[in-house]
Image (cartoon, helix red, strand yellow):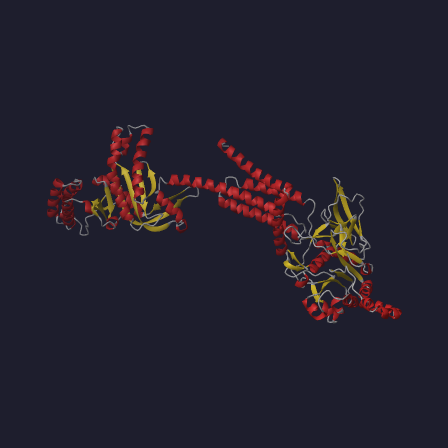
Amino acid sequence: MNNSLIPKIYRHFFIGVTITLLVAAVELFSSGALAQLLNRVEGILYDSRLVFTLPSTAKQYDESVVIIDIDDKSMAEQGRFPWSRSKIAELVNKLTEAGVIVIAFDIFFSEPEINPISQIESQFPNFINSNKLKVSEVKQKIDADSKLAKALSNNDTVLGFLLNNDAHQHTNPLPSSSVYWALNDQKNSQFNVFSGAAVNIPTLQNNASGNGFINAHSEHDGFIRKASLVNKIGNTLYPSLALEAARLYTLADKIETRSHILNGITLFDAIKLNNQWIQTDEYGKILIPYKGPEGSFTYYSATDVLKDKIGEAELEGSVAFIGTSAIGLADLRATPVGLQYPGVEVHANIFRGLIHPEILPAQPSWSSGATLLIIVVVGILLTILSYKKNARYIVTVTLSVAALVVLFNFYLWSIEKISLPLLLPLLLIAILSGYYIFVGSIAEMKHSRKIKSMFDQYVPPDHINQLINQSSNLPQQSVKRNMTVLFADIRGFTSLSENMSAHQLSEYLNQYLSATTEIIFKHSGTIDKYVGDMIMAFWNAPLKDDEHAKHGVEAAIAMIQGLNSINEAFLEKKLPTINIGIGLNTGDMNVGDMGSKYRKAYTVLGDAVNLGSRVESLTKFYEVAILVTKETMIACPHISFRLIDKVQVVGKTSATELFEPIDFTDNLNTAQIAELSKSAEAMTHYYNKNWQESLTLFIELESTSVFSSHIYAIFIKRINETNLNTLSKDWNGAFRHQTK
């Protein structure tokens, strides 16, 4: 292992483990405002999971739970609420007659209803005293509380009462409790403890089958997610309305409880119902198994029951919760499944969960430990998988791990009915991934800069920036494109290098290659490769360049001109000067990533490339610095060229015209212009077989040339050695070269 990597590995894992431990510490030790904030966000995640996993059609069970709704319709037809106890008694009687087996009231009757006879007694005492016996009988018959008490006694009924912390607000005695609490030490318990309650009047309380509190306990954000099954007044545990209704429904006499003492604190464990233990948290609470949004239970308007529109067909064998959904009566709650959810339906949901414990979601005592384990596993996993990975890979891994955590959480919730916190594992994933993506992005930027600096040796820096910006438009595979290719080679390099050491030769070449590469870059060229002293470059790839031939020829001219400063630097170091030959060709070429699965290169291939290489090699034969083909010359009207020859190179059957770029036309002097004109005339005579005229001009040019005169000597010799009578009829003037 590379020792330089060890500190990076340690640093990577140290930071990952540190972040993981910090998140774990939040799970263990958070309190105050931080704990409230986390609980609020966790509540949002809980609500989202609950709503997402609600069945499209609420599952129906054997028991029938209905809600008798004192709604706006009932108040419009029966009068404003509260109604007379006589009307309530009538409602109870009709429910009993229809076959309702348990009736639970999400309302309470803490004050007696005034008997009309009592009012008469206070207004007409003489009349009452003279008719005392008859008045007493009438008073008894029309007493509304007595009527309701009798109606309650005819069925299994549960009256609601409201717990509070004002022991002196109401004088009615507390009801007896059906909850059996076996522990002797009941002082340091975790229950909600109240000092008093607004209870029902004794007449009603004593005739009901049970009593249960109707308090709803919301979280810090105001949402009701849990329900207290038991609450404490003094040393007595009282059942909730739903729990007491479930006791009556299951024909149980008592509600058994189970708790334990830890470090002197009483922690609640479970309640027993229908011979089955139902787990709670240490406060005696359960998560409410919401069946669905408002209306998931069957609602019947109370007025329809009173008018006999609803009867035995709809109600027989059911459990009825009497309450209200009317906005004006202010019994609407914020729940995960609705922001204005009727409180009476909350009780119905709790009752349904108690009767069917298999649907109750549980938050077991080991949930904190399980969350810590998930945090540690996720932290270690992400730390390992993110080491030395790029941002895209980390994002993919992060999303995958997050998806696994969420899916596992949803599996426990949906299948095992276990609710585990989701916030902190996701928070850890977000923090770790954010950190590693940031670090990875920084590393990627450094790596990109390193790669860019490496490619700066082959492609112009501005060119690279364009490539980055236009990367989506670049071809991924080899494409055919009209391009210009350049080959440049040092003349006599072998003999030049014989007297140099390897180090001297490397510096010698680097100085030359750096200078010429800079020139190519300035003219938008791309370096294909260096082969020893040979440079290969091309234009019109990877970015489009409509003037590729022009830029190629201009680069070649600049390279020849740049040799002066290069050679001056060599002379100062007492190194040999150099001359180069440059060949260019324009044509269709294949360009792209080519090679094997082990190594690829961005390069050009094709006959047009090979021809460019052949053209460069002919610069030695003609003793000129630059040669280009006709296709390249035509694309450069601003440059003046001298026709050098028409040749047939090795490997080609067709003739190729070669031209020497002299300079930009605007830079030519009179002598140069005159020589170019005379040279073109001589060449025309030659190819038209006007040998004498051609020879005369070539001889004159050889003696007066301001350019290289070697080409004129070649044609003089060629004319002198050619017999017109031996020329074939299809002679086109092309000279066949036998060597590369």
Count of numbered circles in the view: 0
Q: Which is more toward the observer, 393 or 437?
A: 437
Rendered location of residue 454, percent (x, y): 39, 39
Q: Which is more toward the observer, 204 or 25?
A: 204
Q: Is residue 480 left or right of residue 402?
A: left
Rendered location of residue 655, percent (x, y): 23, 49
Q: Which is more toward the observer, 145 or 556?
A: 145
Q: Is residue 622 left or right of residue 473?
A: left
Asked whether the viewer can see residue 417, the reply is yes
Rendered location of residue 695, percent (x, y): 12, 45
Q: Which is more toward the observer, 579 or 34?
A: 34
In this rendering, the answer to whether 153 lies above or below 397 is below
Asked whether the viewer can see residue 577, the reply is no
Quarter that holds the C terminus: top left
Q: Is residue 198 left or right of residue 711?
A: right
In this rendering, the answer to whether 4 lies above or below 528 is above
Dividing the picture into quadrants, the one containing residue 333 is bottom right
Q: Is residue 415 left or right of residue 84?
A: left
In this rendering, the answer to whether 573 lies above or below 40 is above
Rendered location of residue 235, percent (x, y): 79, 47
Residue furthest out toward the front: 126
In this rendering, the answer to whether 50 lies above or below 126 is above
